[in-house]
Image (cartoon, rainbow, N blue to C red):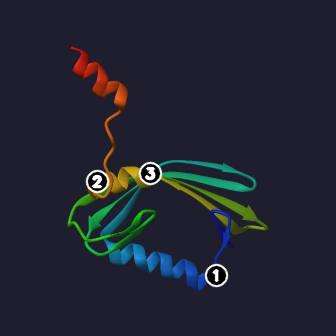
């Protein structure tokens, strides 16, 4: 199976799931919409939970914050011969990092300049 273009074993997938469960307690998924074609299933959902353990993010490890989170995610499952052969995951990583105070948006120079011009 491939996830976002990278080959993964069943053990790799299980490890990812365990890491997510260690980082977030009470994980739940609220399905917003699904779309099915003969070779794809697309699921848009909100993942909710509480950040209770170290989270390995694209920017590095985020220490537990005890904050409730909500992450918008879209999974595209590629179906080959009635089996999921690939998954493309698109999640709002920036939104999650902002909820955890692990990333902040910089003020734009244009906005700053317009405030100083007044």
Tell me: residue 97, above or below residue 2: above
The CA distance from mark 3 to mark 1 is 25 Å
Local crowd size for mark 1, using a 10 Å CA cut-off: few (<14), some (14–19), many (≥20): few
Residue at the outermost bottom position? 11
* Residue 9 quadrant: bottom right
Determine whether the residue tagged by mark 1 lies in a helix, strand or loop.
loop
Question: Residue placed at 33% from the left, 43% from the top?
Answer: 105
Residue holding disc 2: 99
Label 3 or label 1, whichever comes before in sequence order: 1
Q: Is the N terminus in the top left, top right, bottom left or bottom right quadrant?
A: bottom right
* Residue 54 quadrant: bottom left
Residue holding disc 1: 9
Label 1 or label 2, whichever comes before in sequence order: 1
Left or right of residue 22: residue 84: right
Query: Does the CB distance between marks 1 and 2 fall below 8 Å?
Result: no
Question: Residue placed at 40% from the left, 51% from the top?
Answer: 94
Label 3 or label 2, whichever comes before in sequence order: 3
Tell me: residue 13, above or below residue 87: below
Between 101 and 81, the one lying in front of the other is 101
Left or right of residue 27: residue 32: right
Tally the marks.
3
Tell me: residue 15, above or below residue 108: below
Determine whether the residue tagged by mark 3 lies in a helix, strand or loop.
loop
The CA distance from mark 1 to mark 2 is 31 Å
Q: Where in the figure is residue 103, as x and y percent of width and height?
A: 33, 53
Determine whether the residue tagged by mark 2 lies in a helix, strand or loop.
helix
Q: Where in the figure is residue 73, as x and y percent of width and height?
A: 47, 53
Residue holding disc 3: 92
Query: Does the CB distance between marks 3 and 2 fall below 8 Å?
Result: no
Viewer-nearest of discs 1 and 2: 2
Local crowd size for mark 2, using a 10 Å CA cut-off: few (<14), some (14–19), many (≥20): some
């Amino acid at each position: 199976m491939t996830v976002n273009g990278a080959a993964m074993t069943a053990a790799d997938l299980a490890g990812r799931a365990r890491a997510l469960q260690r980082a977030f307690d009470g994980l739940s998924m609220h399905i917003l919409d699904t779309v099915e074609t003969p070779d794809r299933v697309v699921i848009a959902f909100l993942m909710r939970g509480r950040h209770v353990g170290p989270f390995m993010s694209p920017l590095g490890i985020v220490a537990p914050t005890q904050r409730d989170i909500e992450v918008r995610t879209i999974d595209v499952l590629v179906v080959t011969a009635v089996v999921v052969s690939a998954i493309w995951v698109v999640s709002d990583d920036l939104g999650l990092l902002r909820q955890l105070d692990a990333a902040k948006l910089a003020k734009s120079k244009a906005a700053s300049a317009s405030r100083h011009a007044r």
